[in-house]
Amino acid sequence: MTSAARILLASAAALSLAACETATPPPPAPPEAVGGPPSSAVFRPGDFSWSAVPGKGQIVGHLSFHTPRTAYTCAGAGVILTPETLWTRRRITILYNSPILSALPADEVRARTPSAPSGDYSAFVRRTTCDANNHFSFQGLANGAWFVITVAKPIVGSDPDMAIMRRVEIRAGKPVNVEL
């Protein structure tokens, strides 16, 4: 087989893989990358491409967050879903002190918000709204890891608004139930 034939065969294989229904998401960030130097988590729009491929995954969520003295609601509040990349994992860790699960005063999270990237990742962020019963959902998701984020307000009292974040992983297009 000639060199040109091998290149054509490899190109055809790559194109047929690209046409598959679900893209392969990037591997989760290794722990050293989360705490590593900034160069280990550079914003690159191409890192988000896996999340833009329509999939069969869905997230069905409910906010049940409360403290010993306060119940919270997300009714009418926005819920965002951000795809995990090395860059977003590092950003989430800075904001929430964890890349897995967190509930912090919203003002504290806002105060730690790093400057915006040189590019725009908002095109890859999905948005929905909590209903009156604190439920939300996202449909048509690609397999991979995502960060679900909302701001919960106290139902009664003057406790601070809370920024709630949780990492969720979609596998084999199966629905994931999330409790925040």
Image: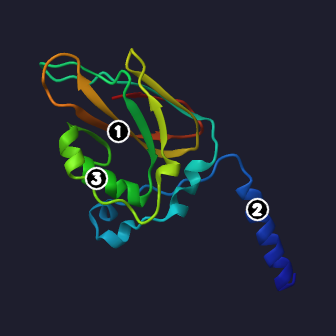
Mark 1 crowd level (few <14, some 14–19, many ≥20, 10 Å Cα):
many
Left or right, residue 37 beside residue 139: left
Which mark is drawn over residue 93?
3
In the rendered structure, are the residues bearing label 2 and label 1 in contact, judged by CB atoms less than 8 Å apart? no
Say above or below: 96 vs 80: below
The first of marks 2 and 1 along the sequence is 2
> Residue 142 at what x, y percent from top left?
58, 44
Say above or below: 120 vs 63: below
Closer-to-camera residue (76/44): 76
The first of marks 2 and 3 along the sequence is 2
Residue at the disc numbered 1 = 166
- Amino acid type of the residue that numbered disc 1 sits on in the rendered structure: Arg
- Amino acid type of the residue that numbered disc 3 sits on in the rendered structure: Thr
Residue at the disc numbered 2 = 15
- Amino acid type of the residue that numbered disc 2 sits on in the rendered structure: Leu
Left or right, residue 34 beside residue 117: left
